[in-house]
Structure formats: C-alpha cells, structure tokens
Amino acid sequence: MSRRSLRRYARRDSNEAALVKAIKACGATWLPIAVRDGPDGVVGWHGKNYLVEIKTPKGAHKDGQRAFDAAWQGTIHVLRTTEDVWKLLGVDPMVLSA
C-alpha cells in the first residue's frame, strides 16, 4: 500500500475536532475508525453504538462513501454541526451549560 493511499484514509473533515469535543462534552465516547470509504467513527452512548460520518456543513459524500452506505445493513449517522450531535444523542444543550 502506498503512502498516498494511507494518507487518504487518515483525511479528516475540518470540523471533526469540534464535533468530537461536543460528543465528549455530552458524556459519550468516541472511537475514530479508518475504513476506506467507511464512517469516521463510532459514538458510544447509554449502551448503544452509532456509526458516524462527519461532514462539513456543505460537504458531500464521495462515490465510495455512497457505495459503502448502500452496502451497509445498518444506519450511518451524518453529523455536520454540534446541533446534529445533540439531536443524535437526545441531549438538551441547555442542560449541558448548567
């Protein structure tokens, strides 16, 4: 495997750090994964696991990601904003700031 293809697997969206921070602030756990064209990570929350794809607000899925999603027999949640994190986890942001 070439260095170029390894680098492609490790490429992350610019808002990933902020969204991971929001996930952890809610008390959930985050496990980044590096599967070609697969989701960016797994969120663990109250006994459930959520496969997550992080995208910038205007980011689009690439062809390989669409193919992976179509073949996957489960749900992959797309997170673009901290509001998406709160919605996925069912967290009230007002409670977090209290």
Image (cartoon, rainbow, N blue to C red):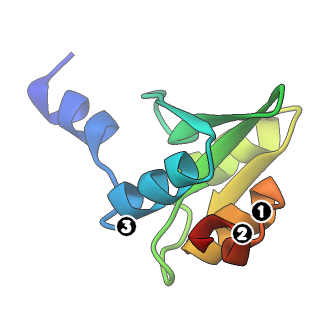
Position of the N terminus, as image quadrant, is: top left
Splitting the image into 4 quarters, where does residue 68 fall?
Answer: top right
- Residue 75 x, y percent position in the rendering: 84, 44
Residue plotted at (79% across, 35% down): 71
- Left or right of 30, for residue 50: right
The C terminus, quarter of image: bottom right
- Point out the residue furthest to the right here: 73
Q: Are marks 1 and 3 in contact (CB under 8 Å)?
A: no
The residue that disc 2 covers is: 95
The answer to whether residue 3 is left or right of residue 8 is: left
- The residue closer to the viewer here, 79 or 96, is 96
Cβ atoms at labels 2 and 1 below 8 Å apart: yes
Question: Is residue 38 among what the camera can see?
Answer: no
Image quadrant where residue 78 sits: bottom right
Tell me the crowding category of disc 1: few under 14, some 14 to 19, or many 20 or more residues within 10 angstroms, Cα based.
few
**Residue identifier under label 3:** 15
Cα distance between the residues tagged 1 and 3? 20 Å
Nearer the observer: mark 1 or 3; the answer is 1
In which quadrant of the rendered view does residue 63 lie? bottom right
Q: Type of residue at label 2?
A: Val
Closer mark to the observer between disc 2 and disc 3: 2
Q: CA separation, marks 2 and 1?
A: 8 Å
Q: Position of residue 69 (x, y in %)?
A: 73, 45
| Residue 41 in picture, x, y percent from top left | 54, 37
In terms of sequence position, does the residue under pointer 2 or pointer 3 come before the other? 3
N-terminal of the pair, mark 1 or mark 3, is: 3
| Residue 91 image label | 1
